[in-house]
Image (cartoon, rainbow, N blue to C red):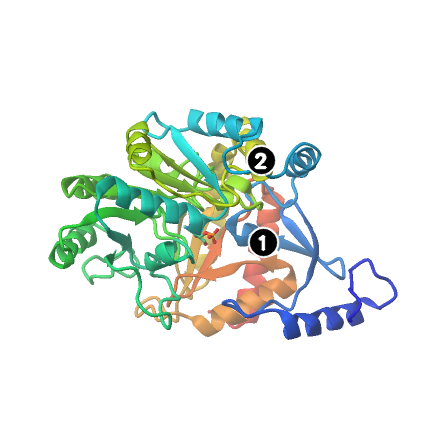
Amino acid sequence: MMQEVRPSDNRLAVSETIAVLRAAAEKHLLFYGRDFSDVIIARAAGAYMYDLDGRAILDFSSGQMCSTIGHNHPAIASALRRSAEEVIHLDSTKLSPSVIALAQELCAQLPRQLQRVMFLNTGSESNEAAIRLAKLHTGRFEIAALGGSWHGMTAGSQSSTYASGRHGYGPALPGTFSLPAPNAFRCPIRHCADHCDSTCLEVGFELFDGWSVGAGAAVIAEPVQSANGIIVPPEGYLRRLKELCSARGMLLIFDEAQTGLGRVGSNFAFETEDVVPDILTLSKTLGAGVPLAATVTSDVINADARAKRFSFYTSHVSDPMPAEVGLAVLRLIVSEKLAVRANEIGKYLFDGLLELKQRYEVIGDVRGRGLLIGVELVEDRRFRKPAHTLMQLATDRCLQLGLNINKAGGPNAVWRIAPPLTIEKSDIDSALSILDTALGQCGAR
Ligand SMILES: Cc1ncc(COP(=O)(O)O)c(C=O)c1O
């Protein structure tokens, strides 16, 4: 049996340790989507990750878009310790004070139409529950989602995920449809140029009406799309979306896995247009790195779900340990007004990126809200061919220089820039300087 190798193991030189770990990873880990990075992370704190050599890497993707209060925040560490001392897991009918407090405090941040919550673990699961709830409540089964969306990897949420991963697994759930996304930089219906006028939404529903067998249950949407390359809908879009759903008796589900709890400069993205969904899902940012998700809905839908014996009974529903963490995260976000901070410091980052755009023709677009920003790379601004090669080279170079950023945008080349909401201006300056150097060294014009 191979001996376990740990970073603190000083029997081996660091370079040998890395080689041994990489070989073991190569041999035993199952591929699940993207190649593993060459960098192996020994620890993380705040906005930084540290590799086995102790080299600091600024994390501008907040882990997998989760760690909004920074890596290993002391409040999370003490919540984990508290839960380890008190209670980690219970059978699904037993509640801990932490679960009840989290429900109360989360609902206190939400409008009166969203006062019933169920705690789960992953975003996929929260959307699965939302979709099942919408189906049971409406008695229908058709679900529409925006093109390029990402709602998860389990069967129901995956069927409404149009970003990738659809080929090779047989049929999606019957009755799943996509509506063109409001991408102003690349209008999906070739109608607008750089300013979306929401015609895509009207066209999408016309198409849906043609395909539908009259069983529309819900539309599920990210209020700001992330995996699709940070697509911010124009003013009025979400309101119209709700109207179009209501006119058909369809529920509106907002998936705020990434946008919820401060990232876009408000506690929830739906607040911007004051459009309250029938069902809200939260995940990544709720546990800020610990698996915790929530599906939230109204008293009316809850009463109907109870009457119809809605079932979403899982091993880790209402688990105390993630709830303890969620409570700590929520309290910190509220007490430190991190949504406001995201807005303010997001402007500083946005301006820095606009300044880079003035100097590099390859930066075709900078867009976003709060601390969720997309930077789209193009070969030239006129024809806007995605600059994939440059993006790969520059992303790799950034990592070598100490900045972790990741790619979104499906077939397009978009950097998704999303540091923790606690990021310091000096770290933003370092990141902008690394981006500048990397672009320059990789031959960007
Ligand atoms: C908007 C959105 N919803 C849902 C999910 C799925 O969450 P999970 O990976 O926790 O299942 C993701 C994951 O990236 C996401 O970005």
User: Mark 2 or mark 1, which is nearer to you?
Assistant: 2
Question: Which residue type carries mark 1?
Answer: Ala
Q: Say above or below: 190 vs 74.
A: below
> Dot 2: within a 10 Å radius of its alpha carbon, few (fewer than 14), some, or many (20 or more) residues?
many
Say left or right for 414 vs 315. Answer: left
Give residue 48's position: percent from left, percent from top.
65, 50
Q: Secondary structure at mark 2?
A: helix
Which residue is outermost to the right?
A: 11
Which label sits on residue 320? 2
Give whichever of discs 2 and 1 has the lower sequence position. Answer: 2
Tell me the kind of residue under disc 2: Pro
Residue 27 x/y as whole percent: 65, 75
Q: Nearer the viewer, residue 230 or 305?
A: 305
Disc on res. 431: 1
Image x and y of residue 442, in percent: 54, 71
Please indicate whether residue 348 sits to the left or right of residue 380 in the image: right
